[in-house]
């Protein structure tokens, strides 16, 4: 529910502001690798098929898992715990990239990231939805979506710069530490009573 501020202006709920800050750190971490992912796969001995297969593993686990977890999470009132678990697994996946030296290990990290995503997404979406002002549906969803595109654009450039200047290992540690900041922020989220 939004709050009134000043001359009748409706402001986004503070929990969604906090949520968007948390989401920004995770979005920054996640999108740093996106545009240069295939280069990383090549560096560990993979080819185009390995890059596509790794992405497929992540997407299929996430896609089927999100559907199943949504049904499961409908039975629970506490989205925050699922958000924390999902983001924690995702953070471990980012750290896991640091240790990847071959395609099989990459596939295992993609499984971990898929598991984190399937746990996270239904809870994350549900949490945000609870605090949306029903009279501002378009603008409050637009806030989330625009932040994702802006952060991803910044992350693509920053991630490429870091990988080019300092290497992929440093990039993965950066992703991991940014995601830890997101987890710390997530601990401050409060469930709607």
Image (cartoon, rainbow, N blue to C red):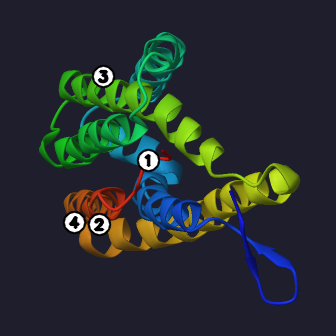
**Viewer-side label of 1, 2:** 1
**Residue designated by label 4:** 170
**Viewer-side label of 4, 2:** 2
Alpha-carbon span between mark 1 and mark 4: 35 Å
Residue 85 location, quadrant: top left
Q: Residues within 10 Å of mark 4 (few under 14, many from 20)?
A: some
Whether the residues at callouts 3 and 1 have beta carbons within 8 Å, the answer is no
**Residue designated by label 2:** 181
Alpha-carbon span between mark 1 and mark 2: 20 Å
Whether the residues at callouts 4 and 2 have beta carbons within 8 Å, the answer is no
Residue 86 shown left or right of residue 56 in the figure: left
Q: Which mark is residue 191?
A: 1
**Residue designated by label 3:** 111
Alpha-carbon span between mark 3 and mark 4: 22 Å
Measured as percent of width and height from the top left, residue 151 is found at 58, 66
Residue 144 shown left or right of residue 183 in the figure: right
Alpha-carbon span between mark 4 and mark 2: 17 Å
Measured as percent of width and height from the top left, residue 78 is found at 38, 34
Kindly state the secondary structure of the residue where label 1 is placed: loop
Residue 136 location, quadrant: bottom right
Whether the residues at callouts 1 and 2 have beta carbons within 8 Å, the answer is no
Residue 96 shown left or right of residue 47 in the figure: left
Kindly state the secondary structure of the residue where label 4 is placed: helix
**Viewer-side label of 3, 4:** 3
Residue 96 shown left or right of residue 114 in the figure: left
């Amino acid at each position: 529910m939004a709050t009134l501020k000043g001359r009748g202006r409706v402001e986004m709920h503070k929990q969604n502001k906090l949520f968007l800050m948390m989401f920004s750190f995770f979005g920054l971490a996640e999108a740093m690798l996106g545009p240069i992912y295939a280069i990383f796969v090549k560096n560990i001995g993979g080819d185009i098929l390995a890059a596509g297969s790794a992405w497929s593993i992540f997407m299929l686990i996430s896609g089927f898992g999100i559907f199943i977890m949504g049904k499961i999470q409908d039975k629970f009132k506490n989205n925050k715990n699922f958000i924390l678990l999902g983001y924690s697994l995702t953070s471990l996946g980012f750290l896991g990239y640091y240790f990847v030296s071959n395609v099989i290990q990459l596939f295992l990290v993609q499984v971990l990231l898929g598991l984190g995503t399937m746990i996270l997404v239904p809870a994350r979406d549900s949490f945000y939805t609870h605090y949306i002002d029903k009279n501002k549906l378009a603008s409050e969803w637009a806030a989330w979506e625009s932040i994702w595109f802006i952060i991803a654009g910044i992350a693509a450039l920053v991630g490429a710069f870091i990988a080019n200047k300092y290497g992929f290992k440093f990039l993965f540690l950066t992703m991991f530490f940014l995601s830890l900041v997101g987890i710390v922020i997530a601990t401050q989220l409060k469930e709607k009573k």
